[in-house]
Image (tube, rainbow, N blue to C red):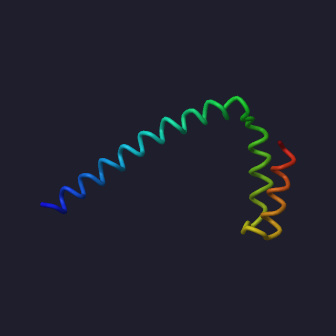
Amino acid sequence: MFKKIVIACAIMLTQHNCKSQEVETSSYFNIVRPEFKGDVAMNTTTFVEQYWRIAGNTGFNETVYRLHLQE
């Protein structure tokens, strides 16, 4: 019986946390959406997919540099 109560509490806490994150992410969406440009996103994706990226390697560094220039 105790295990069922613990599982039920865990499920309720998880659901509560998910709902609170939805509110936060929707506010970020409202901030970012006006700045989103489809052609810029497509060009960035085309550039980034050329590289295998692991933090610190050439592909990663080139990608970060490119994103930094777009600001």
Classify 59 as above or below 32. below
Tell me: 3 left or right of 44: left
Q: Quadrant of the C terminus?
A: top right
Instruction: Write the residue at 36% across / 50% down.
Output: 14
Q: Residue furthest left?
A: 1
Nearest the viewer among 42 and 26 is 26
Picture coordinates of residue 12, whole percent (x, y): 30, 47
Tell me: 31 left or right of 45: left
| Image quarter of residue 64 | bottom right
Instruction: Write the residue at 23% across / 58% down.
Output: 6
Picture coordinates of residue 32, whole percent (x, y): 67, 35
Picture coordinates of residue 10, whole percent (x, y): 30, 54
Instruction: Write the residue at 12% across / 60% down.
Output: 1
Instruction: Write the residue at 84% across / 44% down.
Output: 70
Classify 60 as above or below 12. below
Tell me: 36 left or right of 43: left
